[in-house]
Image (spheres, helix red, strand yellow):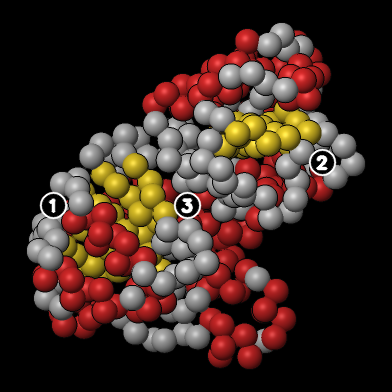
Amino acid sequence: MDLSDEVRSALVQSSRGVIVVGPNRIGPPMLDAVHALSVSTAMPIVADPLSGCRFPVGTRCNVVSHGDALLQAGLLENLRPDLIVRFGSLPVSTRLIAWWSANLSTGGTHIYVNNAGEVHDDTNAITEYVAGDPVSFCHEAGKLQHPEVSRQGWLSRWQELNALAERTVRMCSAASPRWDLGTVRTLIERLGANTILIAGNSLPIRLLDSAGIGLRDGVILGNRGASGIDGLLATALGVAGATSKQVVLLIGDVSMLHDVGSLAEVRRQNVANLCCVVLNNDGGRIFERLPVTDLADLAEQLFVAPHGLDFAGLASAFGLDHRLVSELSSLDVALSDAMDGPPTSILEVRTSAADDLAWERHYIDLLRHAGAS
């Protein structure tokens, strides 16, 4: 691959570069190529939960998996990049998109590499578009001479902050029995090889982003796009029907109710390898994190829309096994029973929206104070 003079110049002259990998169909060659580029250029890899680039804690130490939390805590305000090298679709974190757009608005280069003729750029931030194979790009870019010494301090600071976020979220997860983020981390740590995790939209995919860890040897899929919460269960059924691997769907209660008709296909298609983990916080609680909360009672009625339902009767109506979890300490056993037991089951994790939001804010406050000290 021949790189343009502009791309070459940006790669060589940058001392504060960041690699961003968004949702992507990625395989081992791409994983190795991106990691090699990061090592040769001393650029951190900010990895989306659907990127395929997140790895278990302790491996691939150039990967930054807590970017959104660090942005919430204000710890990236002084880390201003002069170069973004981006692969894949737009990331889940809108804070990350706003961060690179703001920091590159007064200069710098945003290189986007894509070999499918696609351009994912809501904020018109791309300055250099490379239409080509991402693996070839990484190989060519890695051959260039880079100011490695001046970049090591930049990379080290990213690594330190990511490690700080990991320690803080671990501490909060251990302290809270009813924190949704702790539930998601426990789920990821429990799953392993031959597992496909499908992340529902709205709050589940954002919890997965904040969890900051990757699946050990499995695959994480999502169904991002304009459809929102529509058809998530149908997507999981389609994936389960096309593989012999264990499929786990992480889905919110409203999303599950929205697509409840798809449960009829479980028996019709004889699906025997699907476990639906439903985070039941009684409504669309993502809206409690959005500006619509300013509408007070109207927001509760029209957006959050608490339903007061449980999923035991729903599971019974479709002939499915149902298990209820109300404490994080019992999740691991319940998940093992659900995955090793009946062919397809609903694992309902009953959570407290108020406790969850309070713990999220506590986590970010702890991270902010720890990062400032």
N-term-proximal mark, 2 vs 3: 2
| Alpha-carbon span between mark 3 and mark 1 | 24 Å
Q: Can residue 325 be seen in this view?
A: no
Please say if 290 is above or below 31.
below
Q: What element carries label 2?
A: loop
Number of residues whose C-alpha sits closer than 10 Å to that of mark 1, classed few (under 14), some (14–19) or many (20 or more): few
Name the mark nearer the viewer: 2 or 3: 2
In the picture, measured across the screen, residue 199 lies left or right of residue 122, that is left
User: Looking at the picture, does residue 252 appear above or below residue 52?
Assistant: below
Residue identifier under label 2: 104
Location of residue 279 by image quarter: bottom left
Quarter of the image for residue 12 reads top right
- The disc at residue 208 is 3
The amino acid beneath tag 2 is Leu
- The residue at 53%/35% (across/down) is 115
Residue 337 percent across, percent down from the top left? 16, 56
Q: Label 3 crowding class (10 Å Cα cut-off): few <14, some 14-19, many 20+? A: many
- Please state, as top left, top right, bottom left or bottom right, where the N terminus lies in the image: top right
Left or right, 100 with reference to 254? right
Question: First in sequence: mark 3 or mark 1?
Answer: 3
Front residue (pair 359, 68) = 68
Q: Seen from this angle, which residue lies furthest right?
A: 106
> Which residue is found at the position 33% from the left and 76% from the top?
259
Q: In which quarter of the image is residue 324?
A: bottom left
Residue visible at 83% across and 34% down in the picture: 108
